[in-house]
Image: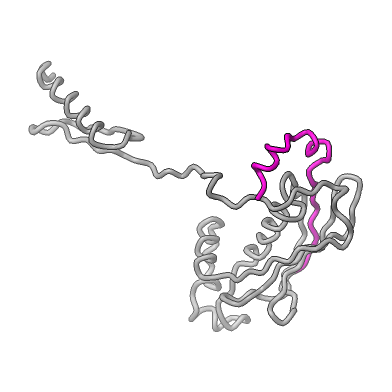
Amino acid sequence: MGSLGNFTDVVAQIRHCLASSRPPIALIAGPCPPSGLKCVINRKPNTMPNPAANPKPRACKSLNEIKVGDELRQPYTITDADVQKFAEISGDFNPAHFNEDYAKNTVFKGRIAHGMISVAKFSGIFGMDLPGLGAIWGAQSVKFLAPVKLNEPHVAIARAKEVAEKFVIFECWAEDATGKRVLEGEGTLYPIPQKVKDAMAPEALKALMA
């Protein structure tokens, strides 16, 4: 067991370590070498989202503010960076998305994007524009019709097909620059209830909107 003097030195070095750095997430100290304490500050990256840095919804439509035929078109192009990010999230690193030598010998004759990246574009449409703030995406069907090539322009389109008592069914499809559909399906959305929207203070609603 070390002496009180050694313990005092250890505490002093810990205080110095803390004073010269940002507050650590964790302080790990192994057995003290003869020269004193060797401390390692283990910092975890700040992964908490910053709401102020994110885009805000551009619409907040309740059921009675949506009509059959209402439509939103969202242009997009899928890049290599998008494919890499989606693979890290989904765990799908299939060589059809990454290995050109492999992909050129498939039926697609080259690398293709994950189909679900295109489906995800409808999350942006529903959450940001139509219906927008307060909407809940209840269900989605999808049929993949053609591959989505990287670095080529596409557009995701959602059109209100049926307005029911509590939900809206949207026809959803994505197409390439020639108008050829690469996927299609239907989404069921539950817009913000009118009574919930009416109960929100105007300044609170404004703060949440773009």
Q: Quadrant of residue 111?
A: bottom right
The residue sitting at 55% across, 83% down in the picture is 105
Would you place residue 64 above or below residue 21 in this image? Answer: below
Against 5, residue 44 (above or below) is: below
Residue 178 picture location, percent across and down: 72, 82
Q: Position of residue 85 (x, y in %)?
A: 51, 60
Residue displayed at 76% across by 63% down: 72
- In the image, 14: left or right of 24? left
Q: Which residue lies most toward the front here?
A: 203
156, above or below 53, in the image: below
Q: Residue at x 50, y 72 (%)?
A: 98
In this rendering, the answer to whether 145 lies above or below 140 is: below
Looking at the rendering, the stretch of residues picked out in magenta corresponds to 184-210
Q: Is residue 191 magenta?
A: yes
Quadrant assignment, res 103: bottom right
Residue placed furthest toward the right: 165
| Residue 194 placement (x, y as % from top left) | 83, 40
